[in-house]
């Protein structure tokens, strides 16, 4: 499968969601909609719906021509209805005062754009309360955008967040998300991935035996517990996409199951899917 992302972010999302179709995404900093896009493949091959946001006029024009989802050309920020300077430098474009890499970008041509909070953007387009995938890449304003979200109203099951190892922004974003029900999934060259705790916790089953539920609970920001009639209770952590139990071993987490290898799979209740 061909990836359109910079470092296979789209493939990682598709894998996590078990190749599911007809799901929903939000893509903030969508650029032209195809170049290094984290959501182009989701839409075109898996029929996902969603919102693409891109404030740069030249990129937005291309975006509307190649995507068949909601396209918005406001600049997502922590406050709405501000008129802010936006530095124009193709894929490195961003709000001038937020750009924290490539100082030369700040010296490029600039335009004035209107802002909108992510909360308002989602409200305006009646986005679903559970959004499967959230891609955020705005060259420095990511923290400000996250601050505008009412996490009690909208849940993002999988977040891909560019940080470029800029501190203290990266740590502040991590703290904000961990405090609002998210779990750190892992990192790549310049992004961090998070998943919502509801993709981990809850009830699972082994094979077709629905009489012995396997129940996973979150104990704190990093630790989980599991209980079941099959064994004594165990505790573990979530690291790089794997649940690592002290006794039960290590399983890779997917949207609807956990795979421990050799046919040992804990799955969600799939009776309604039959």
Image (cartoon, grey):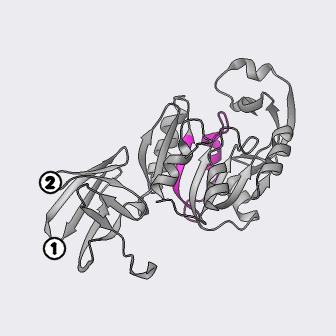
Q: According to the image, label 1 marks what residue?
A: 229
Badge 1, how many Cα within 10 Å: few under 14, some, many 20+? Answer: few
Residue that lies at the very extreme toward the left in this rendered image: 232
| Helix, strand or loop under label 2 | loop
Left/right placement of residue 255 relative to residue 88 reads left
Towards the viewer: 38 or 155:
38
Q: Give the magenta range.
A: 137-161
Towards the viewer: 52 or 174:
52
Image x and y of residue 41, in percent: 63, 51
- Residue contact at pointers 2 and 1, CB within 8 angstroms: no
Q: According to the image, label 2 marks what residue?
A: 247
| Helix, strand or loop under label 1 | loop
Write the residue at 32% across / 49% down.
Answer: 242
Residue 141 in the magenta stretch? The answer is yes
Image x and y of residue 214, in percent: 25, 70
Left/right placement of residue 47 relative to residue 72 reads left
Residue 39 in the magenta stretch? The answer is no
220 w.r.t. 57: above or below: below
Image x and y of residue 138, in percent: 67, 38
Left/right placement of residue 218 relative to residue 56 reads left
Write the residue at 70% across / 38% down.
Answer: 35
């Amino acid at each position: 499968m061909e990836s359109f992302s910079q470092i296979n972010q789209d493939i990682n999302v598709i894998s996590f969601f078990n190749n599911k179709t007809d799901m929903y995404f939000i893509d903030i900093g969508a650029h032209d909609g195809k170049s290094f896009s984290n959501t182009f493949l989701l839409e075109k091959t898996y029929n996902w719906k969603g919102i693409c946001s891109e404030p740069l006029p030249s990129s937005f024009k291309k975006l509307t021509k190649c995507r068949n989802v909601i396209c918005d050309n406001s600049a997502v920020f922590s406050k709405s209805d501000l008129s802010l300077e936006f530095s124009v430098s193709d894929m490195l474009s961003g709000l001038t005062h937020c750009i924290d890499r490539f100082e030369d970008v700040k010296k490029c041509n600039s335009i004035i754009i209107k802002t909108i909070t992510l909360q308002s953007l989602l409200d305006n387009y009646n986005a679903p309360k559970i959004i499967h995938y959230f891609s955020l890449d705005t060259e420095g304003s990511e923290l400000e955008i996250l601050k505008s979200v009412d996490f009690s109203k909208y849940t993002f099951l999988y977040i891909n967040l560019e940080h470029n190892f800029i501190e203290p922004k990266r740590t502040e974003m991590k703290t904000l998300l961990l405090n609002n029900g998210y779990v750190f999934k892992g990192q790549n060259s310049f992004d961090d991935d998070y998943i919502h705790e509801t993709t981990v916790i809850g009830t699972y089953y082994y094979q077709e035996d629905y009489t012995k539920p396997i129940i996973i609970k979150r104990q704190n920001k990093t630790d989980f517990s599991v209980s079941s009639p099959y064994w004594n209770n165990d505790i573990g952590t979530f690291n790089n996409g794997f649940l690592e139990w002290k006794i039960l071993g290590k399983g890779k987490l997917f949207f609807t199951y956990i795979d421990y290898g050799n046919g040992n799979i804990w799955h969600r209740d799939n009776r309604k899917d039959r």
